Amino acid sequence: MLAIYTAHIHRGVGDLGDYQPEPFEESDLKRRRKNMSKHRLPHIVADLDGLVAGYAYVVPFRKRPAYRYTLKHSIYIHPDFQHAGIGRALLPALIESCAAAGYLQMIGYIDSTNVASLRLHESCGFHQVGLLPSVGFKFGRWMDSVMMQRALGLGNQAVPAESKAAFVDC
Ligand SMILES: CC(C)(COP(=O)(O)OP(=O)(O)OC[C@H]1O[C@@H](n2cnc3c(N)ncnc32)[C@H](O)[C@@H]1OP(=O)(O)O)[C@@H](O)C(=O)NCCC(=O)NCCS
């Protein structure tokens, strides 16, 4: 996973590109995965004969409690294994784990020039819900971000138990 993270930083693809973060260590990764699992946030890898060929994870869309059923995700495939069907296997697995954990909406931000990621997301049921122009800067140009969303499980047809209770209390 560290190799994938580092490769994408150096090659400047995806939204990690073109900046030099603090060194990211194995211990940081372990801490992050532990923290995510404590909060029921799926963080999965594609295992290719014992080799991590890609990973995908989610974080809360926003920290405030009203947004607790909505997630923001990221997916990265090792450069040596891109365009070989791994994203196509990993993203549905992430969607399934998030739905099973009870989340109801999933959102991704994708560079508008990242055709592979846009196609992958469309084929996994995501729809474009927004376009954020000129929100990033890399390789000497302004980047537009496409916001893509899909419902999980019942989506907005679900009525979380605590909101029913809150309504009755009022
Ligand atoms: C974008 C990414 C996640 C796609 O994963 P992948 O394993 O390379 O893609 P897959 O081989 O599973 O292909 C999935 C779909 O993406 C599209 N796709 C893949 N490669 C493509 C390419 N070179 N050009 C256009 N579309 C492409 C196709 O629609 C494909 O579906 P198909 O096989 O039915 O035609 C991966 O390439 C990656 O990690 N890229 C760098 C980091 C990144 O951009 N992450 C996403 C940030 S939002």
Image (cartoon, grey):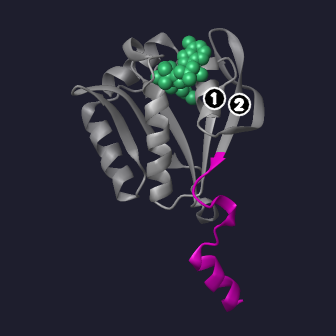
Residue 16 visible in image: no
Query: Circle 1 — which element?
Result: strand
Residue 46 visible in image: yes
Query: Magenta residues?
Result: 150-170
The image quadrant that residue 100 belongs to is bottom left
Disc 2 to disc 1, how far (Cα)?
A: 5 Å
Please rate how many residues cluster around mark 1, counting C-alpha atoms within 10 Å: few if below 14, some from 14 to 19, many from 20: many
Q: Residue at x 21, y 28 (%)?
A: 50
The percent coordinates of residue 134 (x first, y second) are 75, 24
The image quadrant that residue 136 belongs to is top right
Quarter of the rendering occupied by the C terminus: bottom right
Q: Residue at x 49, y 40 (%)?
A: 92
Q: Residue at x 47, y 28 (%)?
A: 87
Disc 2 marks which residue? 146
The percent coordinates of residue 105 (x first, y second) are 61, 53
Disc 1 marks which residue? 110
- 167 part of magenta stretch: yes
Q: Is residue 144 left or right of residue 43?
A: right
In this view, 70 is above or below 18: below
Say if mark 2 contacts mark 1, CB within 8 Å.
yes
In this view, 136 is above or below 34: above
Please rate how many residues cluster around mark 2, counting C-alpha atoms within 10 Å: few if below 14, some from 14 to 19, many from 20: many
Query: Circle 2 — which element?
Result: strand
Q: Amino acid at mark 1?
A: Ile
- 30 part of magenta stretch: no
Quarter of the rendering occupied by the N terminus: top left
The answer as to whether callout 1 falls within 8 Å of ligand 1 is yes
Q: Is residue 132 left or right of residue 49?
A: right
The percent coordinates of residue 126 (x first, y second) are 65, 39
Dot 2 or dot 1: first in sequence order is: 1
In this view, 150 is above or below 50: below
